[in-house]
């Protein structure tokens, strides 16, 4: 019904917008030394992780899971997690036409903040 109401061109523009936002988020992640992309961004899905020196495997999984849960609980972002090439990572799928670039900037800032707090406090 929505496709009939708004037309295929508008839906195409919104999909293109979400793909551009995925590339923007990837570029923002690459600028942060404590974040790393888990895979190149091809569409609107971005997979990344918070890195903490000297941590790997289960420790990084616990750290990134805690970041994900806090982002969700604080209402900052509704992201999920996944495994890419055997490595646990956070997964952002940008599908909402209301997503703004400022939302993506907030996600990056808060991921960095939460990651550093969790590492500092020795929680994960």
Image (cartoon, grey):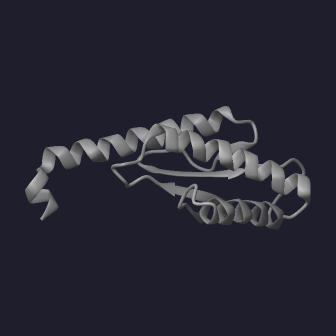
Query: In front: 121, or 29?
Result: 121
Q: Is 46 left, or right, of 110 in this rendering?
A: left
> What residue sits 62% from the left and 58% below the top?
90
Q: Pick the quarter of the image with the N terminus.
A: bottom left
- In percent of width and height, residue 100 lies at 43, 42
- In percent of width and height, residue 78 lies at 53, 61
**118 versus 113 height, above or below:** below
Give the tally of numbered discs: 0
Query: In front: 91, or 88?
Result: 91
> What residue sits 80% from the left and 63% below the top?
57
> What residue sits 36% from the left and 48% below the top?
98
Q: Pick the quarter of the image with the C terminus.
A: bottom right
Q: Is 87 left, or right, of 7 in this rendering?
A: right
- In percent of width and height, residue 26 lies at 55, 40
Q: Is 108 left, or right, of 59 in this rendering?
A: left
Q: Is 70 left, or right, of 19 in this rendering?
A: right
């Amino acid at each position: 019904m929505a496709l009939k109401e708004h037309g295929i061109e508008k839906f195409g523009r919104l999909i293109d917008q979400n793909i551009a936002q995925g590339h923007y988020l990837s570029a923002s992640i690459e600028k942060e030394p404590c974040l790393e992309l888990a895979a190149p961004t091809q569409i609107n899905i971005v997979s990344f992780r918070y890195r903490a020196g000297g941590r790997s495997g289960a420790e990084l999984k616990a750290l990134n899971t805690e970041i994900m849960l806090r982002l969700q609980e604080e209402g900052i972002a509704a992201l999920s997690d996944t495994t890419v090439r055997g490595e646990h990572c956070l997964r952002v799928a940008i599908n909402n036409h209301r997503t703004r670039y400022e939302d993506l900037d907030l996600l990056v800032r808060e991921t960095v903040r939460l990651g550093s707090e969790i590492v500092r406090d020795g929680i994960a």
